[in-house]
Image (tube, rainbow, N blue to C red):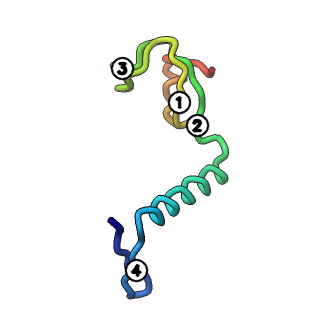
């Protein structure tokens, strides 16, 4: 199924592939503007209680930089 968009007061129909492509282009543009959007971290403590994540001690994961920095500041993880 596609989605209807109103462009310049005319209905415009996008296919699913076109929507995926447009979303991908937005993500790639954001990554170019903000080069370090993700960080790899290694968990030192269980993050389940405080951060509601299902990772275990010793897991190395790649996650959004903002959340990763918050977890590192709380001493639950270190950079991998």
Q: Is residue 38 left or right of residue 7?
A: right
Tell me the SS state at disc 3: helix
In this rendering, is residue 9 above or below 5?
A: below
Q: CA distance from mark 4 to mark 3?
A: 45 Å
**Nearer the observer, disc 1 or disc 4?**
4
Chain-order first, disc 1 or disc 3 = 3
> Residue 38: which numbered mark, if any?
2
Q: CA distance from mark 2 to mark 1?
A: 8 Å
The relative height of residue 62 versus residue 50 in the rendered view (above or below) is: below
> Residue tagged by mark 4?
12
Q: Residue furthest bottom?
A: 9
**Where does label 3 land, which residue?**
48
The percent position of residue 71, horizontal first and vertical second, equals 49, 25
Residue at 65% across, 53% down: 33
If the image is split into quadrants, where does the C terminus sit? Answer: top right
Residue at (62, 22) in percent of width and height? 79
Residue 13 locus on image (x, y percent): 39, 76
Bin the neighbour count of mark 2 within 10 Å (Cα to Cα): few under 14, some 14-19, many 20 and up. Answer: some
Return the disc, 4 or 3, that comes first in the chain's sequence.
Answer: 4
Task: Look at 53% across and 30% down and name the residue there.
Answer: 68
Q: Are marks 2 and 1 in contact (CB under 8 Å)?
A: yes
Disc number placed over residue 29 in the picture, else none: none
- Which residue in the protein does label 1 denote? 68
Q: Earlier in the sequence, mark 2 or mark 4?
A: 4
Depth check, mark 4 against mark 3: the one in front is 4
């Amino acid at each position: 199924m596609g989605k209807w968009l109103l462009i310049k007061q005319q209905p415009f129909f996008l296919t699913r592939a076109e929507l995926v492509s447009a979303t991908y282009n937005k993500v790639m543009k954001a990554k170019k503007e903000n080069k370090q959007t993700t960080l790899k971290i290694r968990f030192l403590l269980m993050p389940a209680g405080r951060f509601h994540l299902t990772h275990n001690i010793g897991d190395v994961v790649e996650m959004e930089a903002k959340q990763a920095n918050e977890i590192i500041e709380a001493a639950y993880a270190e950079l991998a």
